[in-house]
């Protein structure tokens, strides 16, 4: 059996400078950020960067900025309130029918806007066997848990053997019907998404979902698309996750191309996240009004198949809600005003028959 080639990543300011992705004069400011937040960029994503473009949307996502050390008063170490909803280490139980299990706290790449940036990094490690066993007990004792979401960090950074152990352990719990894996690996290191890994995610009689994180259409390379196809070939349902990022994808053309690229790779556009209030990420966020305008524009250009939901994770662990534009408003007397995808309003009469 052949194993996947080893990742050779850029993991320090010096690496980024030697690769021509940052000016040598920036060494001190990059090191100041690196002291606080991890750096990693894989060869697959580094190869997409145009070093001559100071606004390159791939470089922007992975090369640190000194603005990361500026904290807005509204920002929080734990922006989506994982800690408050964590009854056992590594498990978050926010909604009645599903839990998150943070299997690994490391990632193949470290995104500069990461919502768990205070929790992920090379020193953070994976759940120990005893901690995973405690998380399993928690799930086993609660028949209402229908779905388990493996996240991190990036759980697909684990070896296929470890992934298979987690899959098999959860598959043995009858009331768990769905296992979902959140990952950036298909774009960050597509060669690591082997058939063995794809098989390790699958359990007989259960539904496997892989949520693929990408933010710019250039990330969906031929290799990334092939990685997605390997996952689908072993039976995984693929959905997308993206973050609305200023200077990366906050324009209609880029978002439309990104969503079409997902569909072409066999990935259903699922969530476009509004940027969370993670420390030092204010320079990434657009306003919600701008996000809604972009979604309005996408609706006019894309089919429902290619349209994601625009989502906000309410700070403090209160849950995720769609915050897209409104298409309908009440007009009284059983009538509504509905806006069509071109922005033209129409009256809709909400007529009901008598009886049941
Ligand atoms: S891959 Fe996900 S968890 Fe890892 S740094 Fe990027 S956003 Fe954070």
Image (cartoon, rainbow, N blue to C red):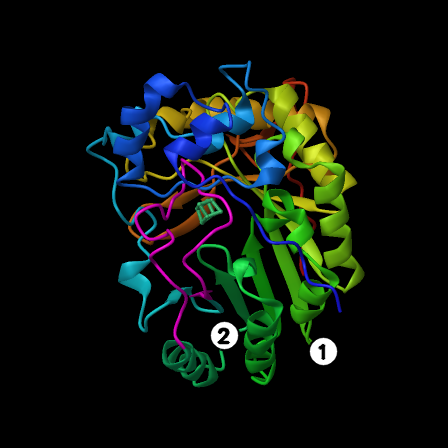
Q: In front here: 208 or 23?
A: 23
Q: Residue at x 77, y 64 (%)?
A: 234
> In the image, which is nearer the foreground, mark 1 or mark 2?
1
**Quadrant of the image occupied by residue 136:** bottom left
In what element is the residue under mark 1? Answer: loop
Is residue 228 within the magenta segment? no
Give the distance between the C-alpha atoms of the residues marked 1 and 2, in whole angstroms: 16 Å
Q: Which residue is mark 2?
A: 145
Q: Secondary structure at mark 2?
A: loop
- Residue linked to disc 1: 205
Give residue 73's quadrant in the image. top left
Q: Which residue is pictured at 42% across the width and 82% down the height? A: 133
From where the camera sits, is residue 23 visible?
yes
Q: Earlier in the sequence, mark 1 or mark 2?
A: 2
- Kindly identify the residue that appears in the image at 55 percent across and 55 percent down: 182
Q: Residues within 10 Å of mark 2 (few under 14, many from 20)?
A: many
In this picture, is 335 found above or below 317?
A: above
Q: Position of residue 162 (x, y in %)?
A: 55, 72
- The picture places residue 271, in percent across and down from the top left corner, at 56, 43
User: Magenta residues, as a range?
Assistant: 100-128
Mark 1 surroundings within 10 Å by alpha-carbon count, few (fewer than 14), some (14 through 19), many (20 or more): few
- Give residue 14's quadrant in the image: top left
Residue 63 at x, y = what percent? 43, 30
| Residue 249, visible in the rendered structure | no
The correct choice, above or below, for 317 with respect to 134 in the image is: above
Asked if residue 108 lies in the magenta stretch, the reply is yes
Q: Position of residue 225 (x, y in %)?
A: 74, 43
- Residue ranking furthest to the left: 73
- CB at disc 2 and ligand 1 closer than 8 Å: no
């Amino acid at each position: 059996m052949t194993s996947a080639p080893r990742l050779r990543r850029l993991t320090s300011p010096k690496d980024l400078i030697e690769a021509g992705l940052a000016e040598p004069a920036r060494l001190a400011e990059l090191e100041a950020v690196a002291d606080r937040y991890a750096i990693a960029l894989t060869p697959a994503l580094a190869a997409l960067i145009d070093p001559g473009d100071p606004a390159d949307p791939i470089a922007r996502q992975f090369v640190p900025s000194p603005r990361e050390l500026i904290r807005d008063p509204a920002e929080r170490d734990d922006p989506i309130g994982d800690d408050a909803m964590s009854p056992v280490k590594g498990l978050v139980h926010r909604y009645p029918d599903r839990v998150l299990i943070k299997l690994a706290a490391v990632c193949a790449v470290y995104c500069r806007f990461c919502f768990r940036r205070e929790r992920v990094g090379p020193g953070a490690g994976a759940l120990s066997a005893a901690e995973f066993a405690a998380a399993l007990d928690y799930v086993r004792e609660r028949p209402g848990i229908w779905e388990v979401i493996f996240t991190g960090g990036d759980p697909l950074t684990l070896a296929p053997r470890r992934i298979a152990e987690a899959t098999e352990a959860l598959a043995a719990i009858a009331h768990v019907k769905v296992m979902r894996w959140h990952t950036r690996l298909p774009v960050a290191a597509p060669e690591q998404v082997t058939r063995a890994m794809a098989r390790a995610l699958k359990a007989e009689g259960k539904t496997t979902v892989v949520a693929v994180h990408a933010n710019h259409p250039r990330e969906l390379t031929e290799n990334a698309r092939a990685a997605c196809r390997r996952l689908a070939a072993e039976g995984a349902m693929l959905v997308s996750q993206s973050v609305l990022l200023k200077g990366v994808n906050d324009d209609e053309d880029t978002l439309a191309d990104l969503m079409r690229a997902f569909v072409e790779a066999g990935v259903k556009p699922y969530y476009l996240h509004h940027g969370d209030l993670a420390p030092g990420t204010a320079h990434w966020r657009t306003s919600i009004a701008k996000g809604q305008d972009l979604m309005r524009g996408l609706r006019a250009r894309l089919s429902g198949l290619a349209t994601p939901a625009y989502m906000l994770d309410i700070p403090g662990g209160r849950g995720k809600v769609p915050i897209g534009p409104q298409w309908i408003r009440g007009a009284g007397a059983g009538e509504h005003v509905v806006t069509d995808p071109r922005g033209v309003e129409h009256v809709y009469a909400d007529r009901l028959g008598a009886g049941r």
